[in-house]
């Protein structure tokens, strides 16, 4: 899929679930629960056991029904795993110029983790499609508002600290989408296999996102 179309999907969805699963099986079942609750953007982090297999299985099961990417990528080898297993977007937790250039050359939608204004500007000039403001918890929505002053056209997405109660604040300051982890898919619910509860949390989260975007 063309990365421009992937970017439009990310904007339309407005929400990516960031999963650091405890096991391959539980991660797959957690994704099923999220999809049942209406979450259609899924980022599987490399720190998830057998992450590349999880991505491959999700791509085969859901095809274009959901948008699957791979995150916490820090090396070219990680990027190759994402490419080989059908990821539609790739995400790094930090800014590294060489890795960013590899991301751009891959042809996949690239989301590069940044925090400082210098990192944001440098990553974008190297060709990053979306700047992941991380950790969002530390920055807060007003930080993106401040960054948007000098960089109004750079797409930004916070990850870390995003919850139902502050969703409106992130979108109000110009976030193209938000990445949500444990507030969307609580770790204890995954560990205890409370998948129906995960679906309920997902439904509420998606409803909140849709209400804000509308």
Image (tube, rainbow, N blue to C red):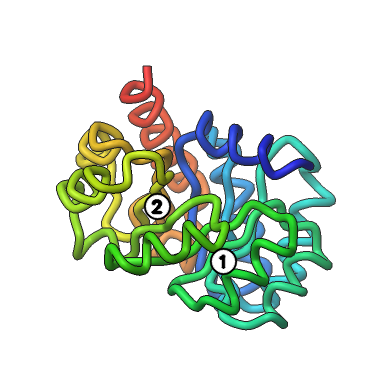
Judging by the rendered image, the residue that carries numbered circle 1 is 71
> In the image, is residue 95 above or below residue 143?
below
Say few, some or many: other residues with alpha carbon within 10 Å of mark 1 (under 14 / 14 to 19 / 20 or more): many
Circle 2 SS class: strand
Mark in the foreground, 1 or 2: 1
| Image coordinates for residue 91, horizontal then vertical, percent | 55, 63
| Mark 1 or 2, nearer chain start | 1
User: At 28% across and 63% down in the image, what residue appears?
Assistant: 117
In the drawing, does residue 161 fall left or right of residue 153?
left
| Image coordinates for residue 199, horizontal then vertical, percent | 49, 41
User: At 53% across and 29% down in the image, what residue appears?
Assistant: 12
Circle 1 SS class: strand
In the drawing, does residue 74 fall left or right of residue 4?
left
Residue 108 quadrant: bottom right
> In the image, is residue 125 above or below residue 210?
below
Q: Which of 23 and 67 is in front in this view?
A: 67
User: At 46% across and 41% down in the image, what residue appears?
Assistant: 15
> In the image, is residue 69 above or below residue 6?
below
* For the residues bearing labels 1 and 2, Cβ distance under 8 angstroms: no
Q: Nearer the viewer, residue 116 or 65?
A: 116
Q: Residue 46 carries which label?
A: none
Judging by the rendered image, the residue that carries numbered circle 2 is 180
User: At 46% across and 47% down in the image, what residue appears?
Assistant: 198
Q: Which of 26 and 75 is in front in this view?
A: 75
In the drawing, does residue 56 fall left or right of residue 99?
right
Q: How many marks?
A: 2
| Image coordinates for residue 10, horizontal then vertical, percent | 55, 39
Quadrant of the rendering where the N terminus is positioned: top right
Quadrant of the rendering where the C terminus is positioned: top left
| Image coordinates for residue 6, horizontal then vertical, percent | 66, 40
Say few, some or many: other residues with alpha carbon within 10 Å of mark 2 (under 14 / 14 to 19 / 20 or more): many
Query: Residues under labels 1 and 2: Cα distance?
Result: 13 Å
């Amino acid at each position: 899929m063309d990365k421009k179309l992937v970017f439009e999907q990310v904007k339309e969805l407005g929400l990516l679930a960031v999963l650091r699963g405890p096991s391959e099986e539980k991660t797959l079942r957690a994704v099923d629960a999220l999809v049942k609750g209406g979450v259609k953007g899924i980022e599987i982090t490399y720190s998830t056991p057998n992450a590349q297999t999880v991505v491959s299985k999700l791509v085969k099961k859901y095809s274009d029904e959901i948008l699957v990417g791979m995150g916490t990528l820090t090396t070219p080898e990680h990027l190759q795993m994402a490419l080989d297993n059908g990821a539609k977007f790739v995400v790094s937790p930090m800014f590294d110029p060489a890795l960013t250039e590899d991301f751009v050359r891959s042809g996949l939608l690239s989301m590069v983790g940044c925090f400082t204004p210098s990192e944001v500007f440098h990553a974008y000039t190297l060709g990053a499609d979306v700047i992941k403001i991380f950790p969002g918890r530390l920055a807060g929505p007003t930080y993106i508002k401040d960054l948007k002053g000098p960089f109004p056209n750079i797409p930004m997405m916070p990850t870390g600290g995003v919850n139902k109660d502050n969703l409106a604040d992130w979108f109000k300051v110009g976030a193209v989408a938000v990445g949500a982890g444990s507030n969307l898919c609580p770790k204890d619910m995954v560990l205890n296999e409370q998948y129906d509860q995960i679906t309920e949390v997902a439904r509420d989260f998606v409803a909140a996102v849709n209400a804000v975007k509308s």
